[in-house]
Structure formats: structure tokens, C-alpha cells
Image (tube, grey):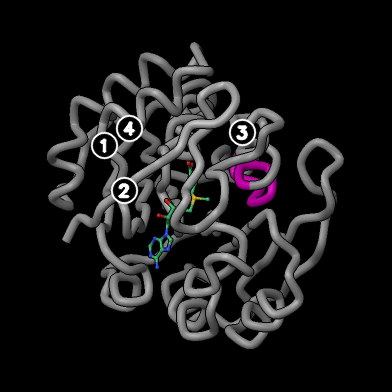
Amino acid sequence: MTKENNLEWHENDRPFSPQFNDHFFSHNDGRLECDHVFLKGNNVQKRWLEATRFSIGELGFGTGLNLLETWRQWCELRQPGQQLHFTSFELYPMSADQIQRAIGPWPMLEEYCKILVKHWPNALKGELIKLDDQTSFQLSVGDAREQLPSWQHKADAWFLDGFSPSKNPEMWEEGLMNALAKKTNINGTLATYTVAVWVRRNLKAAGFEVEKSPGHAGKNQMIRGRLQSGD
Ligand SMILES: C[S@@+](CC[C@H](N)C(=O)[O-])C[C@H]1O[C@@H](n2cnc3c(N)ncnc32)[C@H](O)[C@@H]1O
């Protein structure tokens, strides 16, 4: 079920969720934040050099900024024959217009965003979307706590991008982190912008080795994790 999604727009067309009382990404260039925290945090650019197929999972699709920046970099770095699949879990999907407005500040993502928006009605139905010959995308609409356990795949890298743990604790809770570990390939990794103590505790209890590293734009710290006990 698609639920209501009322947003506010703050400086530079940055979306804000009154429901969660939080922004969707950093005021300090969300695209660069994506590169630092999620892409470099999972070391994906280097791992792509070796991978025939690579699967990324994301908790919290939001504006699609992480998908679009990942896809843009993938197009620059990939070799013929390689495949990237990106799956994202989202309870309150935005409208196509909201996505376009949120991505507007990044002209380098405009063409990618147009393709995503063209496919958006089918994406909302959960269909597998072929973004191009080497890139596919699937949106899982619903509460990640219900959707993830029945997901039929595993990811090589996870982007944990719920709202702040204090405002959106459901996206970081123990049961969801346990499900995450079961849906991670051996030696799979995760990255997130938060270092909340209880989030790290839940990730460790689920079987991830976690370490802190410097955050985006000198901001606080972030977490990088690796699965220790895949099944
Ligand atoms: C920080 S935003 C994600 C930003 C996003 N990755 C981007 O690139 O714009 C967090 C997202 O998590 C979603 N969310 C919150 N609780 C959820 C839940 N229980 N299941 C799935 N998604 C949830 C929110 O609707 C919101 O879109």
C-alpha cells in the first residue's frame, strides 16, 4: 500500500519529512555524501573491478539520489558484460514530481533521473526495471521489517539510509539487522552515516564486524561493516 507522503522543501529544494522531522540527505551536497558514505564506505568502486555481477541493497529509497549517483558512477567505471542490480526498500515512496524536484540541484543526474521517472509507475508495482543493458533496479514498497525477510536475494553491499535512528528507530532495530545479515552475501559489507551505539550493537549482534571511519565533509563519523558469519 502506498501511504501519504507529505514533504516540506527547505533551502535549495532539499526535501524534509515532517512525519520523521528529518531531512533526506545532508545539506552539504547529498550527492558527495552518497559517494563518501555509501559508495566508498562499501568500497564498491574497487569491488566493481572484479565483479561480473554486483548486487546493492538499500534501506530507504527516499529521493533515489543514492540509486542515481551509484548508476552514474557505474556507467563510468563498468566493463562490458558486467551487471549491477540495485534493490531498495521504501515504505513511503515519493511521487515522480517530488523525485525530479529533489534531484534538480544535480544537473549531472538529470538524464538518469528522467529514465527513472519514466519507469516509476512500474517500479511502484515492484516490477524489475531495466535501467540500461547493464543495470537493473527493483523497489520493494512496504515496511522493510516485513519486506526484507521474504526478499529472495542477497546483496554484496548495503546502504543503510533510514532517517536518524532517534527519529526512525524501526529502520535500525535488531530484528531488521538480523534479517539484513541473512540477506548479505559472504564477505558482504554495509555502510551508514550514523554511529549510534545501539545501532552498532544491533549490527554486531547480527554478525557484522563494524568499525567507525571519518564521516562526510568532516562531519562526525560513520560506520563501515562486514559480514562475519554468512550462511
Ligand atoms: C534518509 S531517507 C532515505 C534517503 C534516500 N536514500 C535518498 O537517496 O534520497 C529515509 C527513508 O526511509 C524510509 N522509511 C522510513 N521507515 C521505513 C520503514 N519502516 N520501511 C521502509 N522504509 C522506511 C522513509 O520513508 C525515507 O524515504
The residue positioned 49% from the left and 69% from the top of the image is: 171
- Secondary element at tag 4: loop
Q: Nearer the viewer, residue 167 or 47?
A: 167
- Mark 4–mark 2 Cα distance, whole angstroms, equals 31 Å
Q: Nearer the viewer, mark 4 or mark 2?
A: 2
Q: Nearer the viewer, mark 1 or mark 4?
A: 1
Q: Can you identify the residue that label 3 sits on?
A: 30
Sequence-wise, which precedes: disc 1 or disc 2?
A: 2
Residue type at mark 2? Answer: Asn
Q: Nearer the viewer, mark 3 or mark 2?
A: 2
- Mark 3–mark 4 Cα distance, whole angstroms, equals 25 Å
The residue positioned 65% from the left and 68% from the top of the image is: 226
- Mark 3–mark 2 Cα distance, whole angstroms, equals 21 Å
Q: Nearer the viewer, mark 3 or mark 4?
A: 3
- Does residue 89 appear to the left or right of 38 in the view shown? left
Sequence-wise, which precedes: disc 3 or disc 4?
A: 3
- Secondary element at tag 1: loop
The residue positioned 26% from the left and 76% from the top of the image is: 150
Where residue 224 appears, as percent x and y from the top left, is 71, 60
Q: Can you identify the residue that label 2 sits on?
A: 5
Sequence-wise, which precedes: disc 3 or disc 1?
A: 3
- Please provide the residue range marked out in magenta: 38-45
Q: Is mark 2 within 8 Å of ligand 1?
A: yes
Q: Nearer the viewer, residue 79 or 97?
A: 97
- Secondary element at tag 3: helix
- Mark 1–mark 2 Cα distance, whole angstroms, equals 8 Å
Where residue 160 appears, as percent x and y from the top left, is 55, 59
- Marking on residue 95: 1
